Image (cartoon, rainbow, N blue to C red):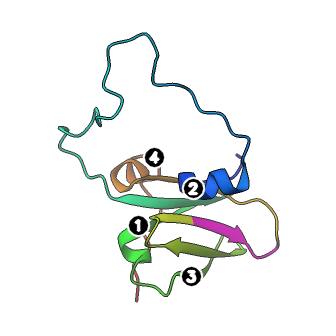
Amino acid sequence: MLPATQTTWSEWRREHPNTLVLSFQTGYQRDYGRDPYALFSMDRRPSLVVIVGDQAKIYPFGELRKTEGILKDSLGGRSFLIRFNPHDQTAHAMAVDGKPLAQFVSFLVDARAFYPRAPVFKAP
């Protein structure tokens, strides 16, 4: 699994100025500015999921917000840093050894469904 990137549009454009975006003019009558899941009753708290081998750990943004913005942790014998930006609501993990680290951002409820045995990080 390749590492995922979660960022803001302005940061992405700064790093990838030639990026093209699909048009909202799709030919379908749909309000693409409206969240289709807004009326669903579901836990939508974002979380970072880090995967090393067959192990996973879940880092809810609400808990990462309680840290200093950088958290050092390890999983499956690999050490990594998690950087959390509360302003942009972004989080990503970087392996200390420089090798790619599998990760993605998900709603907490979905992360728990995919990885029911994964520990969930709680800030001290």
Q: Nearer the viewer, residue 89 or 45?
A: 89
The residue labelled by disc 4 is 114
- Mark closer to the chain start, 4 or 2: 2
Distance CA(mark 4)–CA(mark 2)? 31 Å
On the image, the x and y values in percent for residue 52 come to: 67, 60
On the image, the x and y values in percent for residue 116 come to: 41, 54
The residue labelled by disc 3 is 71
Please name the amino acid that badge 2 sits on. Answer: Ser
Q: Nearer the viewer, residue 99 or 38?
A: 38
Disc 1 secondary structure class? strand
Asked if the residues shown at circle 4 and circle 1 are in contact, with their CB atoms under 8 angstroms apart, the answer is no
Q: Mark 2 packing: few (<14 Cα in 10 Å), some, or many (20+)?
A: few
Asked if the residues shown at circle 2 and circle 1 are in contact, with their CB atoms under 8 angstroms apart, the answer is no
Q: Which residues are magenta?
A: 92-97
Q: Determine the residue located farthest toward the top in the rendered image.
A: 27
Please name the amino acid that badge 3 sits on. Answer: Leu
Relative to residue 43, is residue 67 drawn left or right? right
Majority secondary structure of the magenta segment?
strand
Q: Mark 1 packing: few (<14 Cα in 10 Å), some, or many (20+)?
A: many
Disc 2 secondary structure class? helix
Quadrant of residue 30 within the rendered picture:
top left
Distance CA(mark 2)–CA(mark 1)? 24 Å
